[in-house]
Amino acid sequence: MSSNKNKGNTRNKILGVIIIILGLLFFSVVSAIASLFIIYKNSIHSGISIENVDIGGLTVIEANNRVEVNLKDTLNNDKLILKYNGSSWEFNSEELGLKYDFLKAVNDAYLIGRRGTYLDRIETMIALLKRPYNVSLKTSIDMEKINSILNKIQNEVNIPGLDAEIRREDGKFIIEEERLGLRLNKEKDAKKISEALLNSGFYDSVTIDLTLEPVVPKYRAENLSHIGDLLGSYTTKFNTKLKGRSTNVNIASRAIDRTVLLPNEIFSFNGTVGPRTIKNGYQIAQIILRGKLVDGIGGGICQVSSTLYNSVLMSELGIVERANHTIPSTYVPMGLDATVSYGVLDFKFQNTLDFPIYIESIVSGNKMKVNIYGKKLSNRRIKLTSNIDEIIKKDTSIVFDDDMFKGQKVVEEKGRDGYKVSSYMTIYDGDRFIEKRLISKDYYRPRKEIIKEGTKKPPKERKDNENGQDERDVNN
């Protein structure tokens, strides 16, 4: 009896265990199915919001619509306030070009709990039940609008600097002081504005203090005060009866007058004088074109560039670009000229000294003079010379002309000899010779002379021939 009772208890225990196991299995299967349903359902998990707008249980489209409706008006109230020196400028989100990526935030929310392994996803969903997750909206900024805002503000706050000025009057230098300016640092402020707006919370009002920096003028009285000593001077003459040429010399001379060159700066004759046009006052005078003298606008300004060139050499400044004429000039020795042609040939030199220099260009009567002033540190003086190394004799070509009588000769094109020339700079310290330095080697091409000779018989000779007599009979 007892034995049967024990057997019954054992069966009951086993049956209970089986029921429990089956229940657990059933619960696990149901839980698994439920969790799989939750994980793979086509909606955002509960406990997720965007900028505190609850979107749990919504599809991506539904969530996007809800967020836009709830936040759009509020976000448009964002403000940026810019301040400087008691003034302020206020802008809303539309003026700033602020944009909010609602769809990206919704997609990020949808992916929460859908990454990693099955257990990772279950763990994320459990965590959401305990601690809801708030997705932040990403903001983008239209930097063109920010820059446009700063461009307008700079027109109000910028204070232009004023360069110091120097001029020579009655043999003395007069210097006017510079004035410091202020300039809005647009690059720095645009970066500050961008970072502040992107990192600020929504519904915030962002305030930025604008950055203005001092503008130091290029020319300062302290530097210009070093100018006072004559470094080099050169004078040339021209024919004042040639009105067009004289006018051109005067215009170009005024253009280079009072030029200041800081250390290491390069002077460009064409850049300083500008185009030689009727509009700029230049007149027609003879110019050299392809080795010939022809009429052209601006003829004569090469005398200004050549006079300046010699003054630069006398000042021992650095020559950057220079070319000689194709025809020797009458106003400077061969090898010491400097031709210019706007857009083609330029004369350039560099201030190789440690202090600024000042160019003074004067036209008086039939003379033009260029003085270069600076700070003289020694007793050096310069002598310029040129030497004709070789004369290339011109060729002569004879062209016969049936319309001219025998014995008649006409120079159709006047030729000229060519030259090879070396130019030198002799340097002295006071009266003591230091060195003789080669400046340049130049070549002036010869030009062929063309002579026309007649071949037509004179009238008398034609008449004698018609009578059967030749020239010998007549002469006899």
Image (cartoon, rainbow, N blue to C red):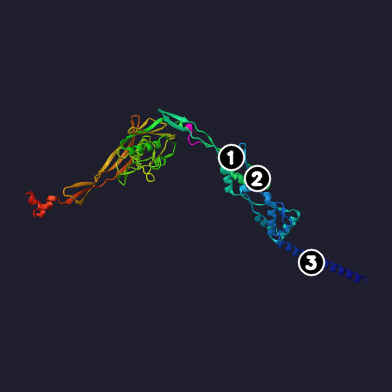
- At numbered mark 2, what does the secondary structure look like: helix, strand or loop? strand
- At numbered mark 1, what does the secondary structure look like: helix, strand or loop? loop
Q: Residues within 10 Å of mark 3 (few under 14, many from 20)?
A: few
Q: State the residue position of label 3.
A: 26
Q: State the residue position of label 2.
A: 79
Horizontal side, residue 144 vs residue 247: left or right: right
Name the residue rendered at 66%, 47% in the picture.
Answer: 78
Kindly report which numbered mark, 1 or 2, lies closer to the viewer in this rendering. Answer: 2
Q: Are marks 1 and 3 in contact (CB under 8 Å)?
A: no
Q: Are marks 1 and 2 in contact (CB under 8 Å)?
A: no
Horizontal side, residue 267 vs residue 97: left or right: left
Residue 218 sits inside the magenta stretch: yes
Tell me the distance, in whole angstroms, between the alpha carbons under discs 3 and 2: 58 Å
Quadrant hosting residue 384: top left
Q: Which residues are magenta?
A: 217-222
Tell me the distance, in whole angstroms, between the alpha carbons under discs 1 and 3: 70 Å
Kind of residue at badge 2 = Lys
Q: Position of residue 141 (x, y in %)?
A: 61, 49
Residue 442 sits inside the magenta stretch: no
Horizontal side, residue 108 vs residue 31: left or right: left
Kind of residue at badge 3 = Phe
- The kind of secondary structure the magenta stretch mainly shows is loop
Kind of residue at badge 1 = Thr
- Front one among 204 and 465: 465
Q: State the residue position of label 1.
A: 211
First in residue order: circle 3 vs circle 2? 3
Tell me the distance, in whole angstroms, between the alpha carbons under discs 1 and 2: 19 Å
